[in-house]
Amino acid sequence: MVKLHAMAVTIGVVGLGKLGLPVAAALALRGYQVIGYDRDDARMRTAALSRYERGPDGEGTLVDLVDDTVPLRFAPLPELLSAADCVFVVVETPHRPMYEGITPLPDSRADFDYTALRRAVSDVAAHAPGPIEIGVMSTVLPGTIRAQILPVATAHPILYCPQFVGMGRVAQDLSRPEFTMIGAPATYRHGTVSTVLASLADAPLFEVSYETAELAKVVYNTFVSAKVTVANLVQWMAHETGADAGDVLRIIRSGDQRLTSAAYLSPGMGDGGPCHPRDNIALSWLFRAHGGEADLFTGVLRTRQAYVEWLARRFAEYAGPLPMTVLGTAFKPGTDLQTGSSSALMVTMLHFAGATAEVVATPADLIGRPPAAAARAYFIGCPEPEFTGYPFAAGSVVVDPWHVVTDRPGVTVHRIGGQPSPAGDG
């Protein structure tokens, strides 16, 4: 495919939330003229970018890279549509909090809420001066584009082009994708959306049906969840049997002929984030709705929850009479998002068990706060450097599922599924 020169295309981005605004900024940094719009005026400014989002090369913050020389501006929807050659719709398709993975798994299941997505696409269709390609990046379940999105924009070509990116590294993942995927009708011929996406990197391009793309997007997250859960089970069993989880997982990571990449095969917490738990819960709903009985999606989720419950029991056991503190409830380092966080789920489990734990959610919460002078029990919920290098008082107990806290004089470090510190026996 011939790649367009970036400056030859103007791209509209509708929906400037935690994914949409970084996408707009990343496209503008590639030289595309980008116009952003959101129903919430507060999002229509580069200052709304999270300072946790890194630049395309992983260095620096994205918000600091988007200066006045970068071709990104914001405008009302009619103005955007009068200038854009294509539009990417990146609005959220939320799940209710009970389906996010930070509370015990309920028996009920539900689809995502597509209200905002339908409204956004409908608004684009209503205000566009003529036919325009609309690329939907929002996460949906199979069948959604054809059943719920096509009917509200019949005069416009609709493409489904979700991105496989991580929070905190959106620009980086857009610049170096594993592949590019576009769901389209059988009659689709290469247009602006596919050309723009293919221009971002030299990666395999898959042009498939709507349903194929929809399913690939969500089951990608199931594979990640299953991989993390297998690593969790290894760590659990290693801790109970005296094996070394780090060594077991290093061995497994070496099996690259059958087990593929080493990503996610390391000690740590359960799977988390704004995508994986909720996507598996929604897939479980869809599977049940179609009469499925052997529900792997629920199995992965229940195993994730069981592992987190077990960690909570170990924390309470090792803490003994010491007051408890959880350091970090973001779902991964480099972000402040707690959606779907297994650390937040563990705090919930401690609460249900009648235990009380102080929570230090992010490193920012340590600013202006003197270190505790007395011994406490700490759980490393998110391995930010500020937490792993915290000056624990003598007599403290640290529960470290990540195997990242170094030995300290007078401090007992329990590395879950690993070797104990000299000061302790866990």
Image (spheres, rainbow, N blue to C red):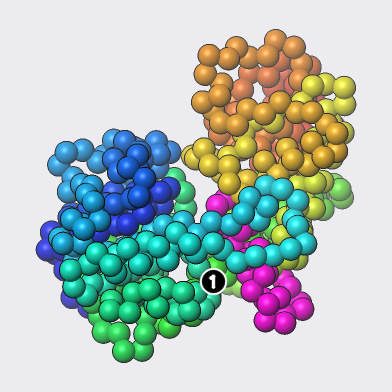
Residue under the image location 49 percent in, 39 percent down = 334
Of 247 and 324, nearer the camera is 324
Residue 16 belongs to the span the image colors magenta:
no
Image quarter hosting the N terminus = bottom left
Vertical placement of residue 28 versus 397, above or below:
below
Residue under the image location 28 percent in, 79 percent down = 155
The residue that mark 1 highlights is 141
Q: Where in the figure is residue 31, as x and y percent of width and height?
A: 18, 54
Q: Quadrant of residue 221?
A: bottom right
Question: Outermost residue toward the left?
Answer: 8
Vertical placement of residue 187 versus 404, above or below:
below
Q: Is residue 205 visible?
A: no
Q: Secondary structure at mark 1?
A: loop
Of 352 and 357, nearer the camera is 352
> Viewed as shown, does residue 243 lie left or right of 217?
right
Image quarter hosting the C terminus = top right
Question: Outermost residue toward the front?
Answer: 126
Of 253 and 178, nearer the camera is 178
Q: Quadrant of residue 415?
A: top right
The residue stretch that appears in magenta = 272-296
Q: Where in the figure is residue 104, as x and y percent of width and height?
A: 75, 51
Residue 285 belongs to the span the image colors magenta:
yes
Q: Where in the figure is residue 133, as x and y percent of width and height?
A: 26, 72
Residue under the image location 45 percent in, 80 percent down = 146
Question: Outermost residue toward the bottom?
Answer: 187
Q: Where in the figure is residue 264, as x and y percent of width and height?
A: 59, 55
Vertical placement of residue 106 versus 334, above or below:
below
> Viewed as shown, does residue 188 lie left or right of 406?
left
Residue under the image location 69 percent in, 31 percent down = 326
